[in-house]
Amino acid sequence: PIALAAAFSRSRRLPAITAAGLALVLGEALLLLGPAPEFSDFKAIYAPMHTPDARVVAEIRSPRGEYLLLDDFTERVDTDVSNNAGLLGLSGPPQTFGLYRDGNRISAIPKPGLPDVGYAAAGLAAAPYEMVTRPRVLLIGASGGFRAAEALALGASEVDVVEPEPALHAAIATQTDDPRVRLLTAGAVGAARAAPGQYALIDLSADFLDAAEANATAFAAEAIADYVRALAPGGIVSIPVSIRDFPVYAARMLATVRAGMLGAGIADPQRNVLVYRSAWSVRILLSATPWDAARVAQLRKFADERSFDVSYYPGIDVAAARANLYNDLPTISFAAGEVESGGPDDAIADEAGAVLAGQSTQSDAAFNLSPITFDRPFFYAVLRLSQIDTILKRLEILPQAEVSALVNLAVLVQAVVIACLVLLVPLLAPSRVRASPGAGLIRPVFYFSSLGLGFLFLEMFAIDRASFYLGDRTSAFALVLTGMLVFSGAGSLLAGRFQSDPRAGVRLAIAVLATWAVLVWLALEPAMLASLGLPFAARGALVLLLVAPVSVALGLPFPLGLTQAGTGGFLPWAWGLNGAFSVVATPAASLLAREAGFSWVLLTAVILYGVAMISFPSVGLSRQWQEKAA
């Protein structure tokens, strides 16, 4: 693009064309002839790739990332299996392939032949299969095909499988022709909403959350409410939580469960929840009706036989339960970095009842336990950025997924510094600027900066909503980005119609944006939920239809602002301001969404465009700049 821009510029100066062409050639040579990139040793794939006899069985490169199917001796099926499997006469997990995307492990994949699931009854996820008889199962996440085979081995009569990750979906589709297994095209929420009252068990797989970024919405409070509504009488929802890194994730999931069950019309969630765990994982079982003593006894027997611990049931005596713990889980002070325990302990049991009752707990002081929602679909967001000093002191123990917020914060600081440098560029050209009244620069600074921020904020909001709707963040990103650029470009073509009154064009654009935002705020989520069952292509077309009108309108303000700047020294500075603050917008919008929700990202975008309308540059400033440039 740089070389083409130089070649087609009006000046067509030979040095510029030569320099651009040379840069293009050197860049391509670096990519083609330079050393092959290697995975960082912080990536999950690094260690298994460096084990003896490890080999890459298959590789797929796609816009979603680089997929590698790895064969090495460290790979095992992703399930939490009891240490008592041998005593129960059950086999352990088999060796598998490991599927990695961009160096991150997303699933185990069975080796050729039928999946070996002899370990299934010893798994942590097996408990609800013993509490219902021949259930019809909605399986959310297939773990490469193992979970469907496990469900059948545990007595499921039918298994409807949700697997939106394309590579996993394709792999599972070729594994089985068992008529009892049906691979759905809908996402988790769409599948649950399409079958109210029909499933005896809704089972979320432990690796589903990390298999794709868009999967986080399957753990939101609104999704949990839909799962509860989809249960048949006596049915169970089974939700996994990994506590390998932070046990506090279980507390946050319980807070989300409470919000979801209240949303489903259950007035007292404490009576409808069971929690049990191993040393590394937690399972939360939900029922539409209160748990009775017989079913609680079933779970306790299951746990005792497998050396698992029951951390919560209605009426549990937490102090008495400590005497028979199999897996000690002491409370750890994040601020002090010390274990707070005088003996066998269960940190989850200590707080589960209070969280389900909506009461504050010890973890509230250090962590964000607010429910995960469609508006704030961030599972890995328990750190309070207001406690940045403590976070930096404990950086070495943070889960990798939590570090992304710190990265965004660091990028935001850098972007703000660069934007401020761009902002101060006119001070480097005093011969062009000083003759203009000092206040004359304020309006264009606010105008072009607000446009850069506002457009990207709106884009980030649209990408998130489309990710949920399409069940795939990569497709959502590509569709929204392309659609908004194309339609805003079409809007820029219409800017000439407002040449006589540019301010009127800006007012029209802001009016369209405000109207669109109100409609989106009120009707977008219900409309998406009602149409989740449509084919992917139809949903993609609706995404484009959604962004088209507002994108056309938002194509007007920037060129109309540039007409006020003329072709003098102000023009490149206006472009620079817009670009610099666009870079600021990405981490800023991400952090705002994490802390307050995507609704606030949308509202902020509208406010920014309102600021732009108020600060529209004057013609007088345009003439001053043109005179100085001349």
Image: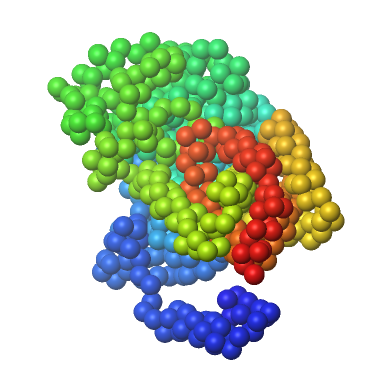
Count of numbered badges drawn on the protein: 0
- State the residue at coordinates (51%, 68%): 60
Quarter of the image with the N terminus in it: bottom right
- State the residue at coordinates (61%, 80%): 6
With respect to residue 346, does 519 lie above or below? below
Do we see residue 453 in this rendering? Answer: no
Quarter of the image holding residue 335?
top left
Quarter of the image holding residue 105?
bottom left
The image position of residue 612, as x and y in percent, is: 65, 44
With respect to residue 456, does 386 lie above or below? above
Do we see residue 599 in this rendering? Answer: yes
The image position of residue 332, as x and y in percent, is: 23, 30
Quarter of the image holding residue 191?
top right
Q: Is residue 253 left or right of residue 225?
A: left
- State the residue at coordinates (55%, 21%): 261
In the foreground, 199 or 333: 333
